[in-house]
Amino acid sequence: MSTQPHMTARMEDHLGLRFPMSLVTYDTYAEAQRAVDFLADKEFPVEDVMIVGTDLKQVERVRGRLTTSKVLLGGLLSGLWIGVFVGLVFAMFEGGDNLVQRLVSTVLIGAVFGLVWAWLGYRSTGGQRDFTSISQVVASRYEVLTEHKHMQTARELLAELDPMRAAQEQVRQRQEQARAEQERMDRGRGGQPT
């Protein structure tokens, strides 16, 4: 794990493992979380486990068209809330006779401020972003890592969780070993395949 400039040594100690090894990779965070939860239920030392999201991408979901009336309504409502908040703060510290009048005036001033601010912000974009959306950074894969000293135990436990996946992983490992052995033998013969 590389050190980020803004990470303190203390943070890095909490986020890193000394000698991590890849235990298993999942397509979703829920699957990775399920595996770690299973290990915890089996009293595995999960303090030596990490879930790492890899292949990050930003996903933006367009929610709808943005119109002037929607912008103005949103600004009005935001301003109303700000006005209510400011009015209540004044009421708490000042009190007095004109409490309702002050509350109403701060709400109205907040509504006008929110309306104007939203309109100015929308107009400044020049129509380049006439839609609303939400965005999130997500990972394509989630890798579960553990300290090397716990690797065999973790593999055995996860084989209980998903025997089919464990069998497929064993087949994949054997194929890789056989391929590596074949390449070694081919190099020994001068690179001539049989």
Image (cartoon, helix red, strand yellow):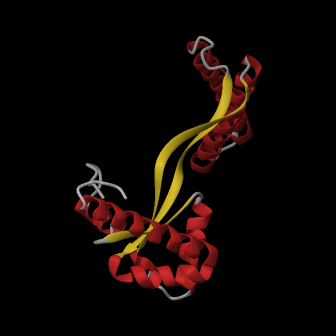
Which residue: 65% across, 45% down? 88
Q: Residue lying furthest bottom in this view?
A: 43
Q: Nearer the viewer, residue 184 or 88?
A: 184
Going by the image, does 24 lie left or right of 67?
A: left
Which residue: 41% across, 78% down? 47
The percent position of residue 124, horizontal first and vertical second, equals: 56, 14
**Which image quadrant is residue 166 in?**
bottom right
Residue 192 against residue 158 in the figure, above or below: above
Residue 70 against residue 50 in the figure, above or below: above
**Which image quadrant is residue 135 in?**
top right
The C terminus is located in which quarter? bottom left
Going by the image, does 10 lie left or right of 42?
A: left
The percent position of residue 134, horizontal first and vertical second, equals: 63, 38
Residue 132 against residue 161 in the figure, above or below: above
Residue 79 against residue 150 in the figure, above or below: above
Q: Is residue 106 visible?
A: no
Q: How many marks?
A: 0
Going by the image, does 31 lie left or right of 2?
A: right
The percent position of residue 176, horizontal first and vertical second, equals: 42, 65
Q: Nearer the viewer, residue 165 or 173?
A: 173
Which residue: 35% across, 76% down? 147
The N terminus is located in which quarter? bottom left
